[in-house]
Image (cartoon, rainbow, N blue to C red):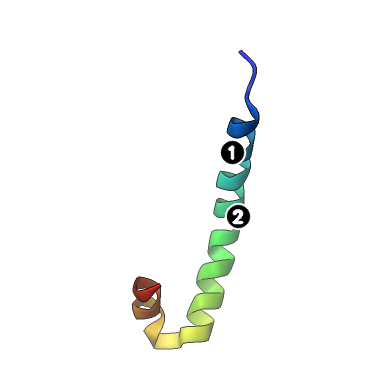
Amino acid sequence: MAITNQERVGKAVDLLRLGLAPYVVREFASTYKDKALAEARRA
């Protein structure tokens, strides 16, 4: 069966999320230092 556009976009978003997660975590920790976890919970 053919893959739908929605499935294609969903897979692309999942791959993007996996690829960007380490960068986002690193930058968030760099910005908020010791308060990164509290800021993440607040957001």
- Across and down, in percent, residue 24 comes to 55, 68
* Looking at the image, residue 28 lies above or below residue 14: below
Numbered label attached to residue 19: 2
Task: Kindly identify the residue that appears in the image at 59 percent across and 67 percent down.
Answer: 23
Mark drawn on residue 11: 1
Give x and y (percent) for residue 18: 55, 52
Residue 40: where, in percent of width, then height?
Answer: 40, 73
| Helix, strand or loop at mark 1 | helix
Image quarter of the C terminus: bottom left
At 63% from the left and 25% from the top, the residue drawn is 4
Toward the top, the furthest residue is 1
Binning the other alpha carbons within 10 Å of mark 1 as few (below 14), some (14 to 19) or many (20 upward) gives few
Instruction: Name the residue located 45 percent from the left edge and 86 percent from the top edge.
Output: 33
Judge by depth and name the residue closer to the eye, 15 or 6: 6
Return the disc, 1 or 2, that comes first in the chain's sequence.
1
Identify which amino acid the numbered label 2 is placed on. Gly
Disc 2 residue crowd, few under 14, some 14–19, many 20+, Cα 10 Å: few
* Residues tagged 1 and 2 counted as in contact (Cβ below 8 A): no
Please state which amino acid type lies under the numbered disc 1.
Lys
